[in-house]
Amino acid sequence: MARCLFAALVPALAACAPPVRPPAYTPRDEVPLAGTPTGIAGWPSPEWWKRYDDPQLDRLIDLATKDSPNLEQADARYRTALRAVDTQKANLSPQVRGLLDGSHGFSDIKLHGQAPGATGSTQGFQLDPGRSWSNNVIAGALFTWDLDLWGKQKDAVAAAVGQARAAEAERATASSSLQLNVAMTYFNWQAINARLALAHEAEHQAEDFRGLVKLRVDHGLDDPTTMDQADAQLASQRQQLAALEGGAALDLAQLAAIVGVSPQELGKLDARPLPVADTTLPPDARLELIARRPDIVAARWQIEAASRSIDSARKAYYPDVSLMALGAFLRTWPDLGSGTRTDLALGNVGPSIQLPIYSGGRLKAAVESSQAALDTAVAAYNAAVVQAAQDVSRQILTMQQLGAEQTQQALSLQANVSQDRRTGERRNRGIIDDRQYITTQLQVIEQKDSQLQLAAQLLSTNLTLINALGGGYHTDHLPALPAATAKDETQ
């Protein structure tokens, strides 16, 4: 009879569980990069910064990733998520709890009374067993094992695994961001150093120009106002030089802060030529970006965790079936010293079934909360996909723009170099004086400085593109996206 009742209750309770509805939003299965060009360059490698063959940069990134607070936080979150997986897995294993209890008791009983209906003191009575001391000792063990017949605990484990995989991808995001910041600050310092060399050259040219003007003014060949112009030109060059020196010092301080050491611990950094930026986009960026961006991977695992949480919440409508066993022993000495004692031993084993007959809406609220978490996870995933497309597209368009500017800048520099050469020839023949030649030299220096700034911007954009492409991260294991159709939540 009990078996028949249980067999009838299970499908009835299962039918009470609310149906799983699709997510309110449709998960994107492709990054929208329509219209962007593709090239033949490979994807960034996990150690993409080594392509620049710069031992100084390698050392700085090693220092930064060694004791970074941001990486430590991300790693701590990942370890916490792993321990949550262990906790859920432990719920699948049997448990044994022990009990040992001892007590010492004292009693002093006095009973006074009177017979019903009697009058007078002669009808009263008194019982006085006296004082007594007693000891009680009980020892027992309880064995429980949730059989998880419906897979509720296994779904909880899967949800915890999804959270751990998401934390792992978020740790990769923190690492990629740190590597990008180190590389960008380092190359910006290199670019400033290259511009400083030009600024010093321009300062010397401006000093020579001022010296020539002073000689002409002193001999009455030029108006004194030309001296003011020469002084202003020299002051402008020195102002730019001071700004660049301050920028270089600031970059070193910022680099030390990112790496997590003092500026002295950075050691001596030598100026090196800027590397040439790679302006091509890897093939199949539209599809591969989903597996290459750690933030997208993390958002996808959040979807998986939310889906499994829904399954676990729905199965709370099913009966919990556990196997239980109890063993206990009780010994009592009712009156110490009397030689009297009482022993009791007991034990039982069998299944335990808990039926969710009435929960006051708690089970339904748990399912709806899990469903809302899934909608949130899908929305966050779609936002990450769109943001990835925007990041990549923005950097590609910026690189195209800077590439076009670089082409025109090269033509302008070529024209100024040619003019400088002809001016030098005319000066050597005595047709013009040194002032015009120095002016042409300053124009060439200015063009070279502009060319350096464009090269630095292009390299910075290239580094940002590498980060937008995932920064060398890749995973071959991704959970499937849930089938989804946009529906009203009230349905």
Image: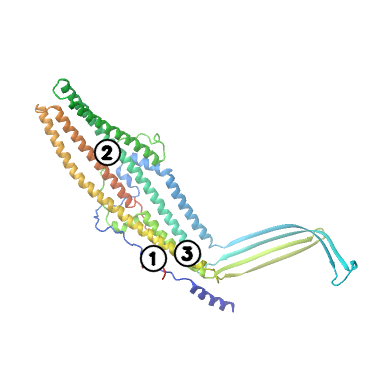
Q: For mark 1, what is the residue?
A: 24
What separation in Å lies between label 2 and label 3 (alpha carbons)? Answer: 55 Å
Instruction: Reply above or below: 135 against 264.
Output: below
Which residue type carries mark 1?
Ala
Which residue type carries mark 2? Pro
Residue 324 in percent (x, y) is at: 60, 67
Residue 118 placed where, x, y %?
87, 71
| SS state under label 3 | helix
Q: Is residue 158 left or right of residue 401?
A: right
Q: Residues within 10 Å of mark 3 (few under 14, many from 20)?
A: many
Cβ atoms at labels 2 and 3 below 8 Å apart: no
Pointer 2 residue = 273
User: Please, what secondary structure does the residue beneath circle 2 have?
Assistant: loop
State yes or no: discs 3 and 1 in contact (Cβ < 8 Å). no
Q: Secondary structure at mark 1?
A: loop
For the residue pair 241 and 284, the one nearer the viewer reads as 241
Q: Residue at x 51, y 60 (%)?
A: 89
First-in-chain label (3 vs 1): 1
Residue 133 lies, with reference to residue 423, above or below; the image says below
Above-or-below relation of 457 to 488: above
Q: Which residue is mark 3?
A: 155
* Number of residues whose C-alpha sits closer than 10 Å to that of mark 2, classed few (under 14), some (14–19) or many (20 or more): few
